[in-house]
Amino acid sequence: MKEYDIYIVPTPIGNLDDITQRAIKILKEVDIIACEDKRITQKLLNHYKIDTKCISYHKFNEKQRIEFFVKILNENKKIALVSDAGTPLICDPGSIMVQELRDKGFKITALPGANALITFLSQIPREDEQFKFIGFMPKTQVQIEKIIIENQNVDLVFYESPNRIIKTLEIIQTKLPNARIAIGRELTKLFEEIIIDEINSIINHFEKTSPKGEFVCLIYRNKNIKNNLDIDKKINILKNKNFKAKEIATILSEFYDFNKNEIYKRVLKQ
C-alpha cells in the first residue's frame, strides 16, 4: 500500500459505529492526531482503544501549527487530521494545513467517511442531482436574504446551529413565504429527525420544541424561477437571431405552450 505523510480522516457525526476499519487502523498507526478539540476526539479514541497522541489544531491556531507539523514530518513521522465530527475541510479546519504542506511537497490522502451533508441528502427526495452547498448560513439578515434570492433556481443546502435555526427560517420566510424546506437534525443519533414541509409549518414545529443538535437544511428550488430563467434564455436566443417581439411571442407560445401575451410583454421589458 502506498504510504502518505498526512491522512485526512473522517470521524462519526454522532453514532460512534460510523467509522471505517481503515480509519481506525490509520489512527492507530500514525504518530500524531491533529484534532479540533482533544476532549471530543479522546472519547472516540478511548472507544476504539487508540492511544495515539493528540495535538489541538483549530481555526485559531492553524498557521502557528504548520511549523510543528513540518518538523514532525521531516522526522519521517505520520499525521492524521480529524475534526470533531465528520470530514475535515468540509466546514471544518484543515484547508491551511493541506495547502501549506502540499506546497512543501508532503504527500496527502483522504479517507472516505461520515459527512452530514451527504448523509442528509441521501434520505430526502430531490428532483435531480444538482444542489448548491454554502456551508453555514451567514449571520446577518442582509447576507441571508441576498443568498436565498440569488439561489432560488437551485436546491440550496446549508448548515445551521440550534440557537439560530428559528431566526434563520424566519428571515427566509420574509423573502420566500411559500418555500418548501427539508431539515435534518441529530443525524445518525437516537433522536434523528427529518422534516420536509412548508416553511411556516417547520417554524411552528420548532417553536413548540427546543431545537437541539446540528441542523442540515435544504430550501427546495423555486420552479417558477427556473421556468422564468428558461423563458429568458429562449427569448435571448431568438433576439440574437433578429426575431421581432411579436415573432418571438408567437414562436414560444406555439412550441412551449407559453402565454403569448405574457411572452410579448417580457420581450419588451428586456
Image (tube, rainbow, N blue to C red):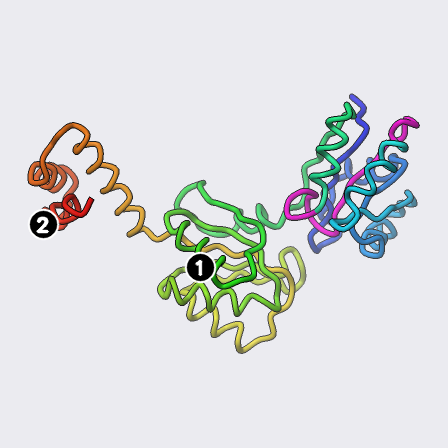
Q: Kindly check if marks 1 and 2 are in contact, taking CB atoms under 8 A apart as contact.
A: no
Q: Which residue is mark 1?
A: 145
Question: Looking at this view, is 199 or 26 the one in front?
Answer: 199
Expressed as whole percent of the image width and height from the top left, the position of residue 133 reads 52, 46
Q: Position of residue 127 (x, y in %)?
A: 39, 46
Query: For this view, does 120 lie left or right of residue 43?
Result: left
In the rendered view, tell whether residue 142 sits above or below residue 241.
below
Q: Residue at x 65, y 63 (%)?
A: 213
Chain part drawn in magenta: 73-92
The amino acid marked with disc number 1 is Glu
82 is within the stretch colored magenta: yes
Task: Compare residues 222 and 127 and report the one nearer the observer.
Answer: 222
- In the rendered image, the quadrant that contains the C terminus is top left
The crowd level at tag 1 (other Cα within 10 Å; few <14, some 14-19, many 20+) is: some
Asked whether 214 falls inside the magenta stretch, the response is no
Task: Identify the residue at horizontal 41%, vertical 54% (top origin).
Answer: 220
Q: Quadrant of residue 90?
A: top right
- Viewer-proximal residue among 242 and 129: 242
Q: Helix, strand or loop at disc 2?
A: helix
Towards the viewer: 241 or 109: 241
Quarter occupied by the N terminus: top right
What is the magenta segment's predominant secondary structure? loop
Name the quadrant containing residue 231: top left
**Residue on which the image places disc 2:** 261
Q: Position of residue 255 (x, y in %)?
A: 13, 37
